[in-house]
């Protein structure tokens, strides 16, 4: 049996493109039909990501209290969408308390380790989804969420293309050996172009705001990539999963999104505070 064809960056490129188009198509369909279905799509992706993270942590004998994390995550995202941020914060606090309580019967050995991992997981996955829900809850929420996803895709695509074609200078070899300064430049070019063009067209923002949005997206996406790379190095895993051919696991696609979500929400809330109706 022949091995799948791989590029310099180690991906099965045809499979990666096909999976990317499928995931992106689902984003467009859910956002621009019944936008609430996009939240269900996000929830499904996060559930798979949580399972992958739990499995990866389990290789180091770290056991997540999944019940309070899942229940708290669902409550946080639902409340953020329907009632805005206040009650979502309360749900986060209660979920943290739930993590501490749920782990008690497991005994003292590893208690701090597991509870710390549980609280980290709440902040890393459901809290990021809260900001997506807050974007989506706006009158122009479908366009805000679409811009957020496009910026993430531009960062990943620009970084990948530049890294493969001209990447020579490692940016953080101790964390992510394949990440290069040339790849970062490619991400910046793509994100700046997307922010400059799409923010005025989709949400009525100014060009200079689009430039700042693009720069912030690159910074957040790069941090997200490096954070997940560091997590994988600490856990000694190559990919978080194998669900997506050419990509790895869901968590390997979420790394940029998780850090970008609060950053993009905040900038859009400042730049376009009252929504855009056209």
Image (cartoon, rainbow, N blue to C red):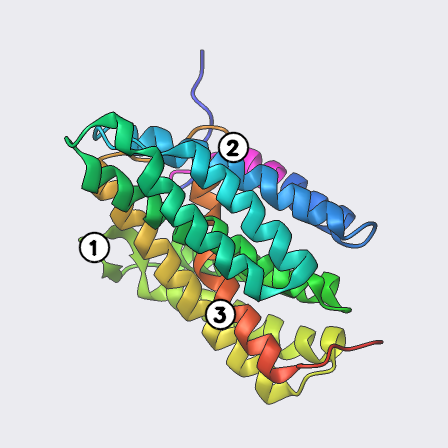
Residue linked to disc 2: 244
Q: Residue 263 carries which label?
A: 3
Outermost residue toward the left in this view? 109
Provide the secondary structure element on which disc 3 rests.
helix
Q: For the residues carrying marks 1 and 2, which lies nearer the camera in this image?
A: 2
Q: Please check the rendered image and state whether residue 181 is part of the magenta-colored stretch, yes or no.
A: no
- Judge by depth and name the residue closer to the eye, 263 or 182: 263
Residue 117: image quadrant is: top left
For residue 135, side relative to residue 246 (left or right): right
At horizontal 60% and vertical 77% (from top left) the residue drawn is: 269
Q: Are marks 3 and 2 in contact (CB under 8 Å)?
A: no
Q: For the residues carrying marks 1 and 3, which lies nearer the camera in this image?
A: 3
Q: For the residues carrying marks 3 and 2, which lies nearer the camera in this image?
A: 3
Q: What predominant SS class does the magenta segment belong to?
A: helix
Residue 182: image quadrant is: bottom left
**Quadrant of the drawing holding the C terminus:** bottom right
Residue 224 in the image: x percent, y percent?
38, 57
- Give the CA distance from mark 1 to mark 2: 25 Å
At horizontal 22% and vertical 28% (from top left) the residue drawn is: 61
- Judge by depth and name the residue closer to the eye, 224 or 207: 224
Residue 105 in the image: x percent, y percent?
27, 27
Quick one: label 1 or label 2, which is nearer the N terminus?
1
Quick one: label 3 or label 2, which is nearer the N terminus?
2
- Give the CA distance from mark 3 to mark 2: 26 Å
Residue 277 in the image: x percent, y percent?
83, 76
Residue linked to disc 1: 173
- Judge by depth and name the residue closer to the eye, 163 or 218: 218
At horizontal 31% and vertical 60% (from top left) the residue drawn is: 180
């Amino acid at each position: 049996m022949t091995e799948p064809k791989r590029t310099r960056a180690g991906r099965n490129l045809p499979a990666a493109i096909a999976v990317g188009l499928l995931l992106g198509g689902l984003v467009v369909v859910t956002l621009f039909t019944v936008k609430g279905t996009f939240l269900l799509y996000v929830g499904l992706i996060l559930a798979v990501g949580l399972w992958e993270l739990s499995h990866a942590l389990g290789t180091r004998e770290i056991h997540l209290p999944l019940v309070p994390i899942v229940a708290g995550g669902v409550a946080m995202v639902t409340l953020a969408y329907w009632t805005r941020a206040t009650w979502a914060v309360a749900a986060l606090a209660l979920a943290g308390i739930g993590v501490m309580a749920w782990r008690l019967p497991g005994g003292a050995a590893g208690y701090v380790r597991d509870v710390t991992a549980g609280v980290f997981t709440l902040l890393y996955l459901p809290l990021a989804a809260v900001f997506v829900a807050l974007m989506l809850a706006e009158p122009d929420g479908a366009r805000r969420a679409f811009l957020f996803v496009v910026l993430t895709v531009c960062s990943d695509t620009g970084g990948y293309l530049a890294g493969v074609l001209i990447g020579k200078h490692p940016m953080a070899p101790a964390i992510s050996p394949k990440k290069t300064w040339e790849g970062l430049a490619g991400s910046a070019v793509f994100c700046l172009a997307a922010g400059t063009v799409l923010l005025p067209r989709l949400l009525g923002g100014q060009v200079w705001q689009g430039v700042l949005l693009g720069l912030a997206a690159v910074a957040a996406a790069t941090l997200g990539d490096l954070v997940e790379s560091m997590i994988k190095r600490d856990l000694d895993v190559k990919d978080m999963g194998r669900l997506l051919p050419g990509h790895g696991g869901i968590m390997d696609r979420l790394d940029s999104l998780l850090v970008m979500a609060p950053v993009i929400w905040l900038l859009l809330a400042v730049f376009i505070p009252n929504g855009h109706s056209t």
